[in-house]
Image: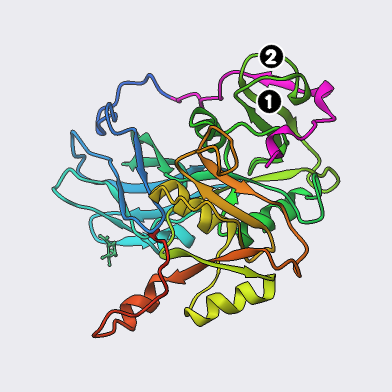
Amino acid sequence: MKCSEILLFASFCVSWSSAINIPSKEEPKKLKYLIDPPVFAEVSGRRGDNVTLPCILQTKPSHYKVKWTKLEPKHVGPENIIMISNAHAFKPYGRLGARASLRKAHIMDASLKLSHLELEDDGVYRCELINGIEDESVVITLRVEGVVFPYQSKNGRYSFTFHEAQKACAEQDGTLATQNQLYKAWTEGLDWCNAGWLVDGTVQYPIIRPRPICGGELLPGIRSYGPKDKRRDRFDAFCFTSQARGSVDYIPGSFSFEQAGQACERQAAELALVGQLYSAWYFHKYDQCDGGWLRDGSVRFPISNPRERCGGIPEAGVRSFGFPNKMTHLYGAYCYRKLEFVSFCKPQTPLHLSPLTKTWI
Ligand SMILES: *[C@@H]1O[C@H](CO)[C@@H](O)[C@H](O)[C@H]1NC(C)=O
C-alpha cells in the first residue's frame, strides 16, 4: 500500500508546529482548601472503563458545594457542568452527569467517578470548591487511551467537509481525533502524507520521515493548515477509537463484498468497522497477513509483526487496498462479534467455529 506516498499538492501553504499547545494553567495561586494535584493531574482509561478524577480537600470549610465541569473541548455549550453536590444533595447534569458520581472514599474526598468511559469524555475537567468566599479549583486531564486512524472517503482523497468527516469517523466506531491524540499517534509512529480534519476544525497531518512531497524537508512533526472552512473545504479525516466490546475474526475465502457479509452472518457476526480493526490491532497486536472486506467496502489487513511478504513496509500498521470493486472475488472477511452474544449465549460445549484468529478487543 502506498497511501503514505500519495502526493500532497497543497504543500506550499503548510506551516509547521513542533510542539502542541499546552493549555496555560490558570493558577500559580496557593490553594487553601483543595490539594493541588502534583501527581495525578492526568488520568487515563479505555472506552468502557471506570475512572476516578481525583480532587482532595486539605481543609474543610463549614459549608461548601463541589462542582465538576468539563472545560475542554468547549463545543458543548457555555459551561459544561457535570454535577453539583453539597452535604445533602447530588445533582447531575447532562450526558456526563448520567455516568458520574462522587467517590467519597473519606470525608476529604471530592473525587469524581465516571463510569463506562466514552470516546468523547477525553478532555480537561475542573473540580471547584464553592463556599461563597474563596472559591477555588483544580484541573485534571482525562485521556482516553486509543488509536488514531486516517480515513479517506470511498469517493477519493480530500472529499470530506468537516461534518462529513465527523460522520465518517462515527460510522467507523470513532470520533474525530484531538490535537493531543494526533500528537501522541505521531510519537508512536504515524506518518501520513494526507491532511485530515481534527475535532477542533483544524486540518493537519503527521510526518516522521520528511520528504519534499509531504510539506518539504522540514523537521519531523505535525504539519498544520490551521483552521479551515468547515462547510466549504474538503480533506480526509483523522479518527480516534479505543477499546471495543467485541472480537474481530478473519474468515479466509475469495469473497465478493456481499459474500463476505454473509460469511460473517453465518458466524453470528457482521463485517467489522475500520475502527474495530484498528482497535484489535492496537490493543491486541492483531496480525493477519490477508486482505479482508470491512463494512465500509474497503479491504485491509492488520500487521503487528512487519515482514517482507506482508506488504513489505517496515512499520506495524493496518494496511489498506482501498475500496476495490465489490464484485471482486479476491478477499476474505473481517468480522466483528459483539461480546454480549458470547456472554448471553454461552453454550455448554464450546461453540464450534472455523479455525479463526481470534482477538478480544
Ligand atoms: C463501573 O461502574 C458501574 C456503575 O458504577 C458498575 O456497574 C460497573 O460494575 C463498573 N465496572 C467496573 C469494571 O468496575
Quadrant of residue 89 within the rendered picture: bottom left
User: Observer-nearest residue: 6 or 77?
Assistant: 6
Q: Which residue is mark 2?
A: 218
Quadrant of residue 33 within the rendered picture: top left
Residue farthest toward the top in the current orientation of the protein:
218
194 sits left or right of 81 in the view: right
Question: How far apart are labels 2 and 1 at the CA level?
Answer: 9 Å
* Residue 120 appears in view: no
Q: Earlier in the sequence, mark 2 or mark 1?
A: 2
Q: Which residue is mark 1?
A: 223
Which residue shows up at 70% across the image and 36% down it?
202
Answer whether residue 4 is magenta in the image: yes
Residue farthest toward the left in the current orientation of the protein:
106
Specify the quarter for ligand 1: bottom left
Q: Position of residue 21 (x, y in %)?
A: 56, 24
Amino acid, disc 1: Arg
Answer whether residue 324 is magenta in the image: no
Q: Position of residue 243 (x, y in %)?
A: 42, 54
Q: Which quarter of the image is occupied by the N terminus?
A: top right
Judged from the image, the secondary structure of the residue bearing numbered disc 1 is strand
325 sits left or right of 343 in the view: right
Which residue shows up at 23% across the image and 53% down it?
103
- Is 174 situated above or below 59? below
Query: What crowding class fits label 1: few (fewer than 14 Cα within 10 Å), some (14-19), or many (20 or more)?
Result: many
Q: Main secondary structure of the magenta part?
A: loop
Query: What crowding class fits label 2: few (fewer than 14 Cα within 10 Å), some (14-19), or many (20 or more)?
Result: some
* Residue 230 appears in view: yes
Contact, CB < 8 Å: mark 2 with mark 1? yes
